[in-house]
Amino acid sequence: MSSNHYCGSKYEQLEEGLTSLPDIPAPIGFTAALLARLPQAHKRQAPFQRWRTAGAVAALLLLLGSPLYVLTDGARPMVESTDPHAAIELQGNSVTVRVGEVLRGDLRVYNAELRVQGRIEGTVYLAASNLVIEPLGEVVGEVRVLPHSWLTRLRFGLVQMGLEVRSYVRGALR
Amino acid sequence: MDLVVASLIKRAKRGEVSAFAELVDTYKDKIYAFLYRMTGNREDADDLAQEVFIRVYSNLHTFDQDMRFSPWLYRIAQNLAIDFLRKRKKTVYLDDQMGQDNDMSWQLESQAPGPEDVTQFHDFQTALETALRELAPMYRMVLLLRFAHDMSYEDIAKVTELPITTVKTRLHRARESLRQALAKQGY
């Protein structure tokens, strides 16, 4: 044994030898080889992350797409009634409550001409619309005119698309 | 934790592969050396080191940045090494000539100044490497972590998931086993 390197306390010499053990470098190209394997490892690890991403994209499209759809849908007339049995006729830009029909509930009309030939027992909300009450027609309730804004259109659009939170829309419209 | 390492981990967690590559470059030699000395085989060490870093990549999102990275990394490495050694029924060291090959001459760099000292130290280190391989893996591991990788008792306890008192006891026994193994070689 070397007198220079292994004398005195044996443990101390051992520790010195262990501390001085040479570095052993990883093979050349180690990192590159590892990185080449990463995508596969990543797929194995978290398939749910792809679903999470897809879900986020879908939510974003819905969030952005719905208002855009509504807002860019031109001058399409929209009508909505709280009376599930209401017989409302929509033809072109004309919305008609026919003679003999009774609509019990509220009626919302956007971008159309509402012709009342029958009877409406509720509140009529009009936005960018005209109201024509014909000789036999009758509205027992209020008629309110809403501002013609993109927000009104959006709210009507959401109602049309079935995305309405009714209490919110009703409240907002009132 | 080293601020540079902390920054690399943060960026790697965000999915920056280049940051992860830097992290690998920082630790690959240490992990490879550790695994080489645990397995005694370059190919196995290479495979295991790759697996270590793949596991790091896959589990980096679970790493708590308030903790130190090095013990976490070594724990993965030691678990893989232990699993590997358990599966390997017979230990065969393909690199038994380590320390005698010309390509290992880098081991002598920065050691004793004179040629005679260098040769003597080289011989001793070769004997030390051989003696290390004769030790039980649990002894070899704590010795390497403590001295070759400069870990504190606390960090070794984290890596091995043992109480500190057990770590100290194991280190003491490991040193004694190493001394006996060296004695067999005339040191």
Image: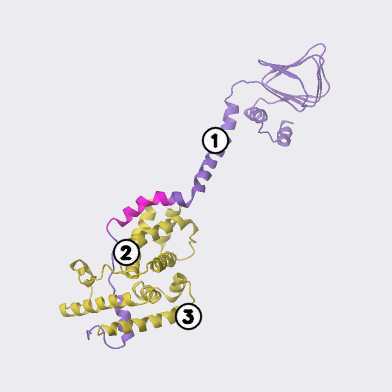
Chain colours: A purple, B yellow
Q: Secondary structure at mark 2?
A: helix
Pointers 1 and 3 in contact (C-beta within 8 Å): no
The residue pinned by badge 3 equals B165
Expressed as whole percent of the image width and height from the top left, the position of residue B72 reads 44, 65
How many numbered circles are shown? 3
Secondary structure category for the residue under label 3: helix
Chain letter of mark 3 equals: B
Which residue is located at x 49 percent, y 50 percent? A46
**Disc number placed over residue A61 in the picture, else none:** 1
Which residue is located at x 68 percent, y 30 percent? A159
In the image as oriented, which residue stretches furthest toward the left? B115
- Marking on residue B29: 2
> Which residues fall within the magenta stretch?
A28-41
Question: Residue B111 at what x, y percent from top left?
Answer: 23, 75
Which quadrant of the structure image shows residue B160?
bottom left
Secondary structure that dominates the magenta span: helix
Q: Gap in Å between the C-alphas at discs 1 and 3? A: 59 Å
Say yes or no: labels 3 and 2 on the same chain: yes
Q: Tell me the CA gap for discs 3 and 2.
A: 29 Å
Disc 1: which chain? Answer: A
Judge the density around disc 1: few (<14), some (14-19), many (≥20) Cα neighbours within 10 Å.
few
